[in-house]
Amino acid sequence: MALPKTSNQRPTTNNHSPAPLKILFVAAECAPFYKVGGLADVIGSLPQALRALGHDVRVIIPRYRPIDAGRYSVKRVHRFIDVPTGENARTTEVVESNYTGVPTYFVWDERFFGRDVVYGQPDELMAYVFFSRAVIELLRIIDWTPDVLHAHDWHIGPALMYLATRGRREARLKSIASVLTIHNLYYQGLGGNALFHFAGFKQTPPRIIGEPPGSVNWLARGIVYADAINTVSPTYARQILTREFGEGLHDLLHTRRDQLSGILNGLDRQEWNPQTDPLLAERFAADSLKKRAVNKRAVQAELKLKRKPHTLLVGMVSRLFEQKGLDILMQAAEQLLQRDVQLAILGHGDEQYHAALQALAAQYPGRVAFDPAFNEPLARKIYGGCDVFLMPSHFEPCGLGQLIAMRYGAVPVVRATGGLADTVIDADRSAQRGTGFTFKAYTAKALLGTLDRALAAYADPDRWQTLQRRGLAADFSWGASAQQYVKLYHRAIELQQNSR
Protein backbone atom coordinates (compact mmCIF):
# COMPACT_ATOMS: atom_id res chain seq x y z
CA MET A 1 0.00 0.00 0.00
CA ALA A 2 1.51 3.32 -1.03
CA LEU A 3 1.53 5.93 1.68
CA PRO A 4 -0.64 9.03 1.11
CA LYS A 5 1.59 11.86 -0.04
CA THR A 6 -0.52 14.72 1.26
CA SER A 7 -1.12 13.55 4.81
CA ASN A 8 1.01 13.06 7.91
CA GLN A 9 -1.41 10.47 9.30
CA ARG A 10 -0.67 6.78 9.46
CA PRO A 11 -2.22 4.50 6.83
CA THR A 12 -5.67 3.41 7.99
CA THR A 13 -8.36 1.07 6.82
CA ASN A 14 -11.98 2.14 6.37
CA ASN A 15 -12.82 1.26 9.97
CA HIS A 16 -9.98 3.52 11.20
CA SER A 17 -7.79 0.66 12.43
CA PRO A 18 -4.16 0.74 11.23
CA ALA A 19 -3.77 -0.78 7.79
CA PRO A 20 -1.23 -3.53 7.16
CA LEU A 21 2.22 -2.21 6.45
CA LYS A 22 4.67 -3.32 3.79
CA ILE A 23 8.04 -3.86 5.43
CA LEU A 24 11.35 -4.84 3.83
CA PHE A 25 13.96 -6.34 6.16
CA VAL A 26 17.50 -5.78 4.88
CA ALA A 27 20.28 -7.63 6.68
CA ALA A 28 23.55 -9.50 6.26
CA GLU A 29 22.15 -12.86 7.40
CA CYS A 30 18.90 -14.68 8.07
CA ALA A 31 18.11 -18.06 9.62
CA PRO A 32 17.69 -20.72 8.42
CA PHE A 33 19.41 -19.77 5.17
CA TYR A 34 22.69 -18.40 6.54
CA LYS A 35 23.66 -17.89 10.17
CA VAL A 36 26.81 -16.60 11.80
CA GLY A 37 25.34 -14.98 14.92
CA GLY A 38 22.18 -13.93 16.71
CA LEU A 39 21.29 -11.41 14.00
CA ALA A 40 20.21 -14.31 11.79
CA ASP A 41 17.76 -15.53 14.44
CA VAL A 42 16.13 -12.10 14.66
CA ILE A 43 15.76 -11.81 10.88
CA GLY A 44 14.38 -15.35 10.78
CA SER A 45 11.80 -14.80 13.54
CA LEU A 46 10.62 -11.18 13.68
CA PRO A 47 9.21 -11.12 10.12
CA GLN A 48 7.17 -14.23 10.98
CA ALA A 49 5.70 -12.48 14.02
CA LEU A 50 4.89 -9.39 11.96
CA ARG A 51 3.20 -11.47 9.29
CA ALA A 52 1.11 -13.09 12.02
CA LEU A 53 -0.13 -9.57 12.81
CA GLY A 54 -1.23 -9.17 9.20
CA HIS A 55 1.67 -7.19 7.75
CA ASP A 56 3.27 -7.78 4.34
CA VAL A 57 6.92 -8.51 5.16
CA ARG A 58 9.78 -9.45 2.87
CA VAL A 59 13.48 -10.04 3.51
CA ILE A 60 16.60 -9.48 1.43
CA ILE A 61 20.09 -10.82 2.20
CA PRO A 62 23.18 -11.68 0.13
CA ARG A 63 23.14 -15.08 -1.56
CA TYR A 64 26.26 -16.61 0.02
CA ARG A 65 27.78 -19.71 -1.53
CA PRO A 66 26.92 -22.04 1.41
CA ILE A 67 23.17 -21.37 1.03
CA ASP A 68 21.62 -24.62 -0.16
CA ALA A 69 19.43 -23.58 -3.09
CA GLY A 70 17.82 -27.00 -3.38
CA ARG A 71 16.98 -27.40 0.28
CA TYR A 72 15.50 -23.91 0.54
CA SER A 73 13.70 -23.90 -2.82
CA VAL A 74 15.63 -20.91 -4.12
CA LYS A 75 14.18 -20.03 -7.51
CA ARG A 76 15.89 -18.32 -10.40
CA VAL A 77 13.42 -15.83 -11.81
CA HIS A 78 15.71 -14.24 -14.41
CA ARG A 79 15.75 -10.93 -12.55
CA PHE A 80 19.02 -9.14 -13.28
CA ILE A 81 19.96 -5.69 -12.09
CA ASP A 82 22.86 -3.39 -12.90
CA VAL A 83 24.49 -2.18 -9.70
CA PRO A 84 26.58 1.02 -10.00
CA THR A 85 30.06 0.66 -8.50
CA GLY A 86 31.91 3.92 -8.94
CA GLU A 87 32.46 4.58 -12.64
CA ASN A 88 31.18 1.15 -13.65
CA ALA A 89 28.28 -1.17 -12.99
CA ARG A 90 28.12 -4.86 -12.14
CA THR A 91 25.27 -7.01 -13.39
CA THR A 92 23.97 -9.18 -10.59
CA GLU A 93 21.17 -11.70 -10.26
CA VAL A 94 18.45 -11.63 -7.62
CA VAL A 95 16.87 -14.99 -6.75
CA GLU A 96 13.93 -15.74 -4.46
CA SER A 97 12.62 -18.26 -1.93
CA ASN A 98 9.37 -18.69 -0.05
CA TYR A 99 10.70 -21.55 2.07
CA THR A 100 9.85 -19.92 5.41
CA GLY A 101 6.58 -18.39 4.28
CA VAL A 102 8.26 -14.98 4.20
CA PRO A 103 9.27 -13.97 0.65
CA THR A 104 13.04 -13.72 0.69
CA TYR A 105 15.30 -12.19 -1.96
CA PHE A 106 18.96 -13.09 -2.36
CA VAL A 107 21.52 -10.88 -4.10
CA TRP A 108 24.10 -13.01 -5.90
CA ASP A 109 27.54 -11.81 -6.95
CA GLU A 110 30.40 -14.24 -7.51
CA ARG A 111 33.11 -11.79 -6.51
CA PHE A 112 31.64 -10.69 -3.21
CA PHE A 113 29.46 -13.57 -2.05
CA GLY A 114 30.81 -16.61 -3.86
CA ARG A 115 32.64 -17.84 -0.76
CA ASP A 116 31.95 -19.40 2.60
CA VAL A 117 32.79 -16.36 4.73
CA VAL A 118 32.49 -12.62 4.08
CA TYR A 119 32.82 -11.24 7.62
CA GLY A 120 36.37 -10.14 8.35
CA GLN A 121 37.62 -10.42 4.77
CA PRO A 122 39.67 -7.56 3.23
CA ASP A 123 36.84 -6.53 0.90
CA GLU A 124 34.03 -6.96 3.45
CA LEU A 125 33.16 -3.26 3.35
CA MET A 126 32.99 -3.22 -0.45
CA ALA A 127 30.80 -6.34 -0.39
CA TYR A 128 28.16 -4.73 1.81
CA VAL A 129 28.30 -1.39 0.02
CA PHE A 130 27.59 -3.38 -3.13
CA PHE A 131 24.75 -5.21 -1.39
CA SER A 132 23.23 -1.94 -0.17
CA ARG A 133 23.28 -0.48 -3.67
CA ALA A 134 21.78 -3.68 -5.07
CA VAL A 135 18.87 -3.27 -2.64
CA ILE A 136 18.25 0.25 -3.95
CA GLU A 137 18.37 -0.93 -7.57
CA LEU A 138 15.96 -3.78 -6.82
CA LEU A 139 13.48 -1.36 -5.26
CA ARG A 140 13.50 0.60 -8.50
CA ILE A 141 12.26 -2.34 -10.58
CA ILE A 142 10.07 -4.64 -8.48
CA ASP A 143 6.31 -4.20 -8.42
CA TRP A 144 6.27 -3.72 -4.65
CA THR A 145 7.29 -0.63 -2.70
CA PRO A 146 7.67 -0.97 1.06
CA ASP A 147 6.29 1.54 3.51
CA VAL A 148 9.33 0.90 5.68
CA LEU A 149 12.84 -0.32 4.96
CA HIS A 150 14.07 -1.98 8.16
CA ALA A 151 17.89 -2.02 8.11
CA HIS A 152 20.02 -4.04 10.50
CA ASP A 153 23.50 -2.98 11.64
CA TRP A 154 26.24 -1.15 9.74
CA HIS A 155 26.03 -3.30 6.62
CA ILE A 156 22.96 -1.39 5.40
CA GLY A 157 24.30 2.10 6.19
CA PRO A 158 24.96 2.91 2.51
CA ALA A 159 21.35 2.11 1.59
CA LEU A 160 20.03 4.35 4.36
CA MET A 161 22.28 7.19 3.24
CA TYR A 162 21.22 6.82 -0.39
CA LEU A 163 17.53 6.58 0.49
CA ALA A 164 17.64 9.75 2.61
CA THR A 165 19.58 11.82 0.07
CA ARG A 166 19.31 10.93 -3.59
CA GLY A 167 16.32 8.65 -3.05
CA ARG A 168 14.17 11.55 -1.87
CA ARG A 169 14.20 12.86 -5.45
CA GLU A 170 12.87 9.62 -6.96
CA ALA A 171 9.18 8.78 -7.14
CA ARG A 172 9.74 5.08 -6.38
CA LEU A 173 11.88 5.74 -3.31
CA LYS A 174 10.84 9.03 -1.76
CA SER A 175 7.91 7.64 0.25
CA ILE A 176 9.92 4.86 1.93
CA ALA A 177 10.54 5.43 5.65
CA SER A 178 13.52 3.78 7.33
CA VAL A 179 14.33 2.14 10.65
CA LEU A 180 17.84 1.15 11.76
CA THR A 181 18.21 -1.55 14.39
CA ILE A 182 21.60 -1.60 16.12
CA HIS A 183 22.28 -5.13 17.31
CA ASN A 184 25.80 -4.39 18.57
CA LEU A 185 27.31 -0.91 18.51
CA TYR A 186 30.84 -2.30 18.58
CA TYR A 187 30.70 -3.24 14.90
CA GLN A 188 30.60 -0.05 12.82
CA GLY A 189 31.85 -0.70 9.28
CA LEU A 190 34.78 1.74 9.35
CA GLY A 191 36.74 2.18 6.10
CA GLY A 192 38.36 4.64 3.74
CA ASN A 193 36.25 7.40 2.21
CA ALA A 194 36.88 6.02 -1.29
CA LEU A 195 33.91 3.82 -0.41
CA PHE A 196 31.62 6.82 -0.91
CA HIS A 197 32.54 6.81 -4.59
CA PHE A 198 32.04 3.04 -4.79
CA ALA A 199 28.60 3.55 -3.21
CA GLY A 200 27.61 5.98 -5.96
CA PHE A 201 28.26 9.34 -4.33
CA LYS A 202 30.30 11.48 -6.69
CA GLN A 203 31.51 13.83 -3.98
CA THR A 204 32.76 12.96 -0.52
CA PRO A 205 30.17 14.30 1.93
CA PRO A 206 31.18 16.33 4.99
CA ARG A 207 32.44 14.33 7.95
CA ILE A 208 30.04 13.50 10.74
CA ILE A 209 30.59 12.80 14.42
CA GLY A 210 32.32 9.44 14.78
CA GLU A 211 34.20 9.52 11.48
CA PRO A 212 38.00 9.94 11.60
CA PRO A 213 39.52 12.13 8.85
CA GLY A 214 39.57 10.37 5.49
CA SER A 215 37.21 7.64 6.67
CA VAL A 216 33.60 6.56 6.50
CA ASN A 217 31.71 4.97 9.39
CA TRP A 218 28.70 3.21 7.88
CA LEU A 219 26.95 2.66 11.20
CA ALA A 220 27.32 6.35 12.02
CA ARG A 221 25.92 7.21 8.58
CA GLY A 222 22.97 4.92 9.26
CA ILE A 223 22.35 6.64 12.59
CA VAL A 224 22.33 10.03 10.87
CA TYR A 225 20.09 9.08 7.95
CA ALA A 226 17.57 6.58 9.38
CA ASP A 227 14.17 8.05 10.25
CA ALA A 228 14.02 6.06 13.50
CA ILE A 229 16.62 4.05 15.39
CA ASN A 230 16.37 1.30 17.94
CA THR A 231 18.53 -1.20 19.69
CA VAL A 232 17.60 -4.57 21.09
CA SER A 233 16.83 -3.76 24.72
CA PRO A 234 15.69 -0.68 26.63
CA THR A 235 18.71 -0.73 28.96
CA TYR A 236 21.20 -0.98 26.09
CA ALA A 237 19.46 1.95 24.37
CA ARG A 238 20.20 4.04 27.46
CA GLN A 239 23.71 2.69 27.92
CA ILE A 240 24.93 3.54 24.42
CA LEU A 241 24.32 7.21 25.18
CA THR A 242 27.20 7.01 27.68
CA ARG A 243 30.93 7.17 27.05
CA GLU A 244 31.43 3.72 28.63
CA PHE A 245 29.14 1.90 26.21
CA GLY A 246 28.87 4.34 23.29
CA GLU A 247 31.88 2.97 21.36
CA GLY A 248 32.82 6.49 20.29
CA LEU A 249 29.33 7.25 18.95
CA HIS A 250 27.66 8.46 22.15
CA ASP A 251 27.82 12.12 21.12
CA LEU A 252 26.29 11.31 17.73
CA LEU A 253 23.57 9.19 19.35
CA HIS A 254 22.72 12.09 21.66
CA THR A 255 21.81 14.12 18.56
CA ARG A 256 19.22 11.43 17.68
CA ARG A 257 18.14 10.46 21.18
CA ASP A 258 14.54 11.54 20.53
CA GLN A 259 14.40 9.01 17.68
CA LEU A 260 16.18 6.24 19.66
CA SER A 261 14.34 3.46 21.49
CA GLY A 262 14.95 -0.03 22.82
CA ILE A 263 12.87 -3.11 21.96
CA LEU A 264 13.74 -6.50 23.43
CA ASN A 265 14.45 -9.36 21.09
CA GLY A 266 12.07 -12.26 21.41
CA LEU A 267 12.51 -16.01 21.58
CA ASP A 268 11.03 -18.49 19.14
CA ARG A 269 9.07 -20.63 21.59
CA GLN A 270 8.44 -23.36 19.05
CA GLU A 271 12.13 -23.69 18.21
CA TRP A 272 13.05 -23.62 21.90
CA ASN A 273 10.59 -25.90 23.66
CA PRO A 274 11.73 -28.41 26.31
CA GLN A 275 8.51 -30.38 25.86
CA THR A 276 9.28 -31.19 22.21
CA ASP A 277 13.04 -30.70 21.79
CA PRO A 278 14.37 -33.89 20.14
CA LEU A 279 17.95 -33.11 21.18
CA LEU A 280 17.25 -33.38 24.90
CA ALA A 281 17.95 -36.66 26.65
CA GLU A 282 14.59 -36.23 28.41
CA ARG A 283 11.81 -33.78 27.60
CA PHE A 284 10.03 -32.02 30.43
CA ALA A 285 7.62 -29.26 31.43
CA ALA A 286 6.99 -27.07 34.46
CA ASP A 287 4.98 -29.85 36.11
CA SER A 288 7.66 -32.49 35.47
CA LEU A 289 10.86 -30.71 36.49
CA LYS A 290 12.27 -33.86 38.07
CA LYS A 291 12.85 -35.16 34.54
CA ARG A 292 15.55 -32.49 34.08
CA ALA A 293 17.80 -34.71 36.18
CA VAL A 294 18.14 -37.02 33.16
CA ASN A 295 19.55 -34.14 31.12
CA LYS A 296 21.95 -33.24 33.93
CA ARG A 297 23.25 -36.81 33.96
CA ALA A 298 23.58 -36.72 30.17
CA VAL A 299 25.70 -33.54 30.32
CA GLN A 300 27.88 -34.99 33.05
CA ALA A 301 28.35 -38.23 31.12
CA GLU A 302 29.10 -36.58 27.76
CA LEU A 303 31.59 -34.14 29.27
CA LYS A 304 33.14 -36.69 31.65
CA LEU A 305 32.08 -34.80 34.74
CA LYS A 306 31.56 -36.78 37.93
CA ARG A 307 28.02 -38.04 38.26
CA LYS A 308 26.94 -36.01 41.27
CA PRO A 309 23.21 -35.25 41.11
CA HIS A 310 23.22 -32.75 43.99
CA THR A 311 26.29 -30.73 42.96
CA LEU A 312 25.42 -27.37 41.37
CA LEU A 313 26.09 -27.67 37.64
CA VAL A 314 26.97 -24.27 36.16
CA GLY A 315 26.60 -24.10 32.37
CA MET A 316 27.81 -21.55 29.87
CA VAL A 317 27.22 -21.51 26.09
CA SER A 318 28.95 -18.50 24.66
CA ARG A 319 31.41 -16.94 22.29
CA LEU A 320 34.63 -16.71 24.25
CA PHE A 321 35.48 -13.02 24.22
CA GLU A 322 36.13 -10.49 26.95
CA GLN A 323 32.72 -8.93 26.23
CA LYS A 324 31.16 -12.12 27.57
CA GLY A 325 32.87 -11.83 30.96
CA LEU A 326 35.54 -14.48 30.44
CA ASP A 327 38.14 -12.31 32.15
CA ILE A 328 36.28 -12.08 35.47
CA LEU A 329 35.23 -15.73 35.24
CA MET A 330 38.86 -16.82 34.96
CA GLN A 331 39.80 -14.53 37.85
CA ALA A 332 37.06 -16.14 39.97
CA ALA A 333 37.58 -19.74 38.87
CA GLU A 334 40.00 -20.94 41.58
CA GLN A 335 37.82 -19.60 44.40
CA LEU A 336 34.63 -20.77 42.72
CA LEU A 337 35.92 -24.32 42.55
CA GLN A 338 36.41 -24.35 46.30
CA ARG A 339 32.60 -24.62 46.37
CA ASP A 340 30.60 -27.73 45.51
CA VAL A 341 30.12 -26.85 41.85
CA GLN A 342 30.84 -28.20 38.39
CA LEU A 343 31.49 -26.09 35.28
CA ALA A 344 30.34 -27.06 31.77
CA ILE A 345 31.47 -24.51 29.17
CA LEU A 346 30.78 -24.71 25.44
CA GLY A 347 32.02 -22.10 23.00
CA HIS A 348 34.82 -20.78 20.85
CA GLY A 349 36.59 -17.45 20.44
CA ASP A 350 39.86 -15.93 21.65
CA GLU A 351 42.73 -18.40 21.87
CA GLN A 352 43.77 -17.06 25.27
CA TYR A 353 40.46 -18.21 26.73
CA HIS A 354 40.62 -21.53 24.91
CA ALA A 355 44.00 -22.19 26.50
CA ALA A 356 42.93 -20.98 29.94
CA LEU A 357 39.78 -23.12 29.97
CA GLN A 358 41.62 -26.19 28.71
CA ALA A 359 44.17 -25.73 31.49
CA LEU A 360 41.39 -25.33 34.06
CA ALA A 361 39.69 -28.52 32.86
CA ALA A 362 43.01 -30.38 33.10
CA GLN A 363 43.55 -29.06 36.62
CA TYR A 364 40.05 -30.07 37.75
CA PRO A 365 39.16 -33.32 35.94
CA GLY A 366 35.61 -34.41 36.58
CA ARG A 367 34.68 -30.93 37.80
CA VAL A 368 35.39 -28.65 34.83
CA ALA A 369 34.63 -29.46 31.20
CA PHE A 370 35.31 -27.32 28.14
CA ASP A 371 34.29 -28.04 24.55
CA PRO A 372 35.55 -25.48 22.00
CA ALA A 373 33.59 -26.90 19.07
CA PHE A 374 30.16 -25.73 17.93
CA ASN A 375 27.91 -28.52 19.15
CA GLU A 376 24.18 -27.81 18.92
CA PRO A 377 23.02 -31.07 20.57
CA LEU A 378 25.37 -30.49 23.52
CA ALA A 379 24.25 -26.86 23.79
CA ARG A 380 20.64 -28.01 24.06
CA LYS A 381 21.58 -30.52 26.75
CA ILE A 382 23.43 -27.85 28.73
CA TYR A 383 20.40 -25.55 28.59
CA GLY A 384 18.15 -28.42 29.64
CA GLY A 385 20.45 -29.95 32.26
CA CYS A 386 22.49 -27.28 34.01
CA ASP A 387 21.23 -25.85 37.29
CA VAL A 388 22.67 -22.37 36.73
CA PHE A 389 23.26 -20.69 33.39
CA LEU A 390 26.06 -18.15 33.59
CA MET A 391 26.30 -14.87 31.63
CA PRO A 392 28.73 -12.47 33.38
CA SER A 393 28.89 -10.15 30.35
CA HIS A 394 30.66 -6.79 30.34
CA PHE A 395 27.97 -5.62 27.94
CA GLU A 396 25.09 -7.48 26.30
CA PRO A 397 22.82 -5.65 23.83
CA CYS A 398 20.04 -8.18 24.43
CA GLY A 399 21.24 -11.71 25.02
CA LEU A 400 19.55 -14.90 23.94
CA GLY A 401 21.16 -17.42 26.28
CA GLN A 402 19.34 -16.23 29.40
CA LEU A 403 15.98 -16.46 27.61
CA ILE A 404 16.67 -20.01 26.44
CA ALA A 405 17.97 -20.96 29.89
CA MET A 406 14.78 -19.83 31.62
CA ARG A 407 12.69 -21.55 28.96
CA TYR A 408 14.61 -24.75 29.75
CA GLY A 409 14.37 -24.54 33.54
CA ALA A 410 17.89 -23.28 34.29
CA VAL A 411 18.31 -20.37 36.69
CA PRO A 412 20.35 -17.53 35.15
CA VAL A 413 23.20 -15.82 36.97
CA VAL A 414 23.95 -12.68 34.97
CA ARG A 415 25.53 -9.26 35.16
CA ALA A 416 22.80 -6.60 35.16
CA THR A 417 23.69 -4.95 31.87
CA GLY A 418 21.83 -4.42 28.59
CA GLY A 419 19.12 -6.96 27.89
CA LEU A 420 20.21 -9.09 30.84
CA ALA A 421 19.04 -6.32 33.17
CA ASP A 422 15.71 -6.18 31.33
CA THR A 423 14.95 -9.90 31.41
CA VAL A 424 16.34 -11.41 34.64
CA ILE A 425 14.79 -10.37 37.96
CA ASP A 426 17.01 -10.87 41.01
CA ALA A 427 15.41 -13.37 43.37
CA ASP A 428 16.81 -11.78 46.53
CA ARG A 429 15.62 -8.31 45.60
CA SER A 430 12.18 -9.46 44.45
CA ALA A 431 11.10 -12.56 46.31
CA GLN A 432 7.71 -12.65 44.57
CA ARG A 433 8.95 -12.16 41.01
CA GLY A 434 12.58 -13.26 40.93
CA THR A 435 13.80 -15.52 38.13
CA GLY A 436 17.57 -15.52 38.71
CA PHE A 437 20.48 -13.70 40.30
CA THR A 438 22.15 -10.52 39.08
CA PHE A 439 25.18 -8.37 39.95
CA LYS A 440 26.23 -4.88 38.87
CA ALA A 441 29.95 -4.47 39.53
CA TYR A 442 32.11 -5.98 36.79
CA THR A 443 34.41 -7.83 39.18
CA ALA A 444 35.29 -11.40 40.10
CA LYS A 445 34.21 -10.62 43.68
CA ALA A 446 30.71 -9.61 42.57
CA LEU A 447 30.43 -12.70 40.39
CA LEU A 448 31.48 -15.00 43.25
CA GLY A 449 29.10 -13.34 45.68
CA THR A 450 26.20 -13.81 43.28
CA LEU A 451 27.04 -17.47 42.68
CA ASP A 452 27.11 -17.91 46.46
CA ARG A 453 23.59 -16.50 46.62
CA ALA A 454 22.56 -18.99 43.93
CA LEU A 455 24.16 -21.83 45.91
CA ALA A 456 22.18 -20.82 49.00
CA ALA A 457 18.94 -20.87 47.02
CA TYR A 458 19.87 -24.23 45.43
CA ALA A 459 20.12 -25.70 48.93
CA ASP A 460 16.39 -25.01 49.33
CA PRO A 461 14.67 -27.29 46.75
CA ASP A 462 11.26 -25.65 47.09
CA ARG A 463 12.67 -22.18 46.50
CA TRP A 464 14.77 -23.41 43.59
CA GLN A 465 11.81 -25.03 41.86
CA THR A 466 9.84 -21.81 42.31
CA LEU A 467 12.57 -19.94 40.44
CA GLN A 468 12.62 -22.58 37.72
CA ARG A 469 8.86 -22.46 37.24
CA ARG A 470 8.85 -18.68 37.02
CA GLY A 471 11.48 -18.85 34.31
CA LEU A 472 9.53 -21.48 32.42
CA ALA A 473 6.39 -19.33 32.65
CA ALA A 474 8.09 -16.12 31.47
CA ASP A 475 6.87 -15.10 28.02
CA PHE A 476 9.61 -13.64 25.86
CA SER A 477 7.97 -14.65 22.59
CA TRP A 478 8.18 -12.38 19.55
CA GLY A 479 4.53 -11.32 19.66
CA ALA A 480 4.91 -8.44 22.12
CA SER A 481 8.13 -7.27 20.48
CA ALA A 482 6.49 -7.32 17.05
CA GLN A 483 3.72 -5.04 18.29
CA GLN A 484 6.33 -2.58 19.56
CA TYR A 485 8.06 -2.67 16.17
CA VAL A 486 4.78 -1.83 14.44
CA LYS A 487 4.53 1.28 16.63
CA LEU A 488 8.12 2.12 15.72
CA TYR A 489 7.37 1.74 12.00
CA HIS A 490 4.45 4.14 12.27
CA ARG A 491 6.67 6.56 14.16
CA ALA A 492 9.28 6.33 11.38
CA ILE A 493 6.61 7.00 8.76
CA GLU A 494 5.47 10.11 10.64
CA LEU A 495 9.04 11.36 11.01
CA GLN A 496 9.79 10.73 7.34
CA GLN A 497 6.62 12.48 6.15
CA ASN A 498 7.23 15.47 8.43
CA SER A 499 10.78 15.84 7.12
CA ARG A 500 9.70 16.33 3.48
Image: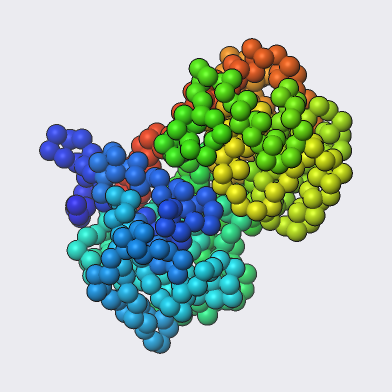
Q: Position of residue 284 (x, y in %)?
A: 51, 25
Q: Position of residue 118 (x, y in %)?
A: 53, 69
- Horizontal side of 322 relative to 158 (left or right) equals right
**Does the image show residue 445?**
no
317, 398: nearer the viewer:
317
Colour scheme in use: rainbow
Tell me which residue sits at (34%, 77%) in the image: 92
Q: Residue furthest left?
A: 14
Residue 437 position by quadrant: top right
Residue 416 position by quadrant: top right
Q: Position of residue 273 (x, y in %)?
A: 47, 33
Q: Position of residue 201 (x, y in %)?
A: 42, 77
For the C terminus, the image quarter is bottom left
**Does the image show residue 316?**
yes
128, 273: nearer the viewer:
273
325, 294: nearer the viewer:
294
Tell me which residue sits at (78%, 48%) in the image: 357
Give the mark count: 0
Q: Is residue 112 above or below residue 224?
A: below
- Horizontal side of 179 relative to 244 (left or right) equals left
- Horizontal side of 308 relative to 292 (left or right) equals right
375, 414: nearer the viewer:
375
Tell me which residue sits at (77%, 52%) in the image: 353
- Horizontal side of 292 relative to 263 (left or right) equals right
Tell me which residue sits at (67%, 41%) in the image: 302
